[in-house]
Image (tube, rainbow, N blue to C red):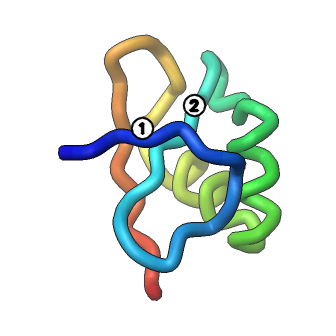
Amino acid sequence: MNIAFVPPNLPTTGAVAVGVLEECKLTPVGEELDKKLDGELTRAMSNSRFNGKKRAPMAVIAPA
């Protein structure tokens, strides 16, 4: 597995990790990505039991 820290952008392949603070507050990079995805991250969090606490990951499968 290769991990790279790059400027925020929407990848065309692979996966992206987004930081989320408690109470489901997105980091600035997460907010930018959520805007590019028309709010999909916000909707996914609100439709799940995810709470943003430590060690509580949430996988979001997004369409191509």
Q: Quadrant of residue 13?
A: bottom left
Q: Nearer the viewer, residue 22 or 27?
A: 27
Instruction: Please state if 33 lies on the left or on the right of 18 as rendered.
Output: right
Q: Quadrant of residue 63?
A: bottom left
Q: Nearer the viewer, residue 29 or 62?
A: 29
Q: Quadrant of the N terminus?
A: top left
Q: Position of residue 58 (x, y in %)?
A: 37, 42
Q: As shown in the figure, which amino acid type bears the numbered disc 2?
A: Gly
Q: Secondary structure at mark 2?
A: loop
Q: Which residue is mark 1?
A: 49
* Residue 39 against residue 58 in the figure, above or below: below
Instruction: In the displayed orientation, state which residue is furthest to the left.
Output: 1
Residue occupying image coordinates x 53% and y 57% = 44
Residue occupying image coordinates x 61% and y 56% = 41
* Residue 15 against residue 38 in the figure, above or below: above
Residue occupying image coordinates x 55% and y 47% = 45
Q: Position of residue 31 (x, y in %)?
A: 78, 46
Q: Which residue is mark 2?
A: 19
Q: Secondary structure at mark 1?
A: loop
Q: CA distance from mark 2 to mark 1?
A: 17 Å
